[in-house]
Image (cartoon, helix red, strand yellow):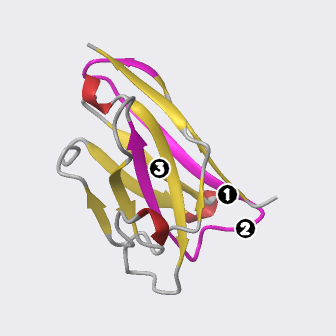
């Protein structure tokens, strides 16, 4: 089965931290750029962060800059989103999306149809 799977969501208090993981089965992420998106109830899906296939280039939405860090561990075939200083407005379902690319230093951005596969999502809830 070719799957993208997110994990690490949960309930955390204001100011707390979570680390989300994105992994794949049936293929490796070595040649895939990665994007993290989130969707809050009643709101549209929005881009949060993205990283190039090599891991050398990253980008963050203005709302999470300075608080979130995206990085990848090729040895574990995983991409992580470290979320610190969490706020209630960070609450939502977080999705990992992958996009095949032979260009290791190029990020894809936040256009939904630029990505090939999506995970099922993991719930993040930040209490006030």
Q: Main secondary structure of the magenta part?
A: strand
Residue range corresponding to the magenta coloring: 11-39
Distance Cα–Cα, label 3 vs label 1: 12 Å
x and y percentages locating residue 19 in the rendered image: 45, 38
x and y percentages locating residue 115 in the rendered image: 51, 67
Distance Cα–Cα, label 2 vs label 3: 17 Å
How crowded pointer 3 is (Cα within 10 Å; few <14, some 14-19, many 20+) is rated as many
How crowded pointer 1 is (Cα within 10 Å; few <14, some 14-19, many 20+) is rated as some
Distance Cα–Cα, label 1 vs label 2: 6 Å
Secondary element under disc 2, as helix, strand or loop, is loop
x and y percentages locating residue 124 in the rendered image: 44, 29
Residue at 67% of width from left, 57% of height from top? 24
39 left or right, relative to 115: left
Which of 58/94 is in front? 94
**Residue under numbered circle 3:** 80
**Residue under numbered circle 2:** 27
**Residue under numbered circle 1:** 24
Marks 1/2 in contact by CB < 8 Å: the verdict is yes
The nearer-to-camera label among 2 and 3 is 2
Q: Earlier in the sequence, mark 3 or mark 1?
A: 1
Could you say which quadrant of the image residue 17 lies in? top left
């Amino acid at each position: 089965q070719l799957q993208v799977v997110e994990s690490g969501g949960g309930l955390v208090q204001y100011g707390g931290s979570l680390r989300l993981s994105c992994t794949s089965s049936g293929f490796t992420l070595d040649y895939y750029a990665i994007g993290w998106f989130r969707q809050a109830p009643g709101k549209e899906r929005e881009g949060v962060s993205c990283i190039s296939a090599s891991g050398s280039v990253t980008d963050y939405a203005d709302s999470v800059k300075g608080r979130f860090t995206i990085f990848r561990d090729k040895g574990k075939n995983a991409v992580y989103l470290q979320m610190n200083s969490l706020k209630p407005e960070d609450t939502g379902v977080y999705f990992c999306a992958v996009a095949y690319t032979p260009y290791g230093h190029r990020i894809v951005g936040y256009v939904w149809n630029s990505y090939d596969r999506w995970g099922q999502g993991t719930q993040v809830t930040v209490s006030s």
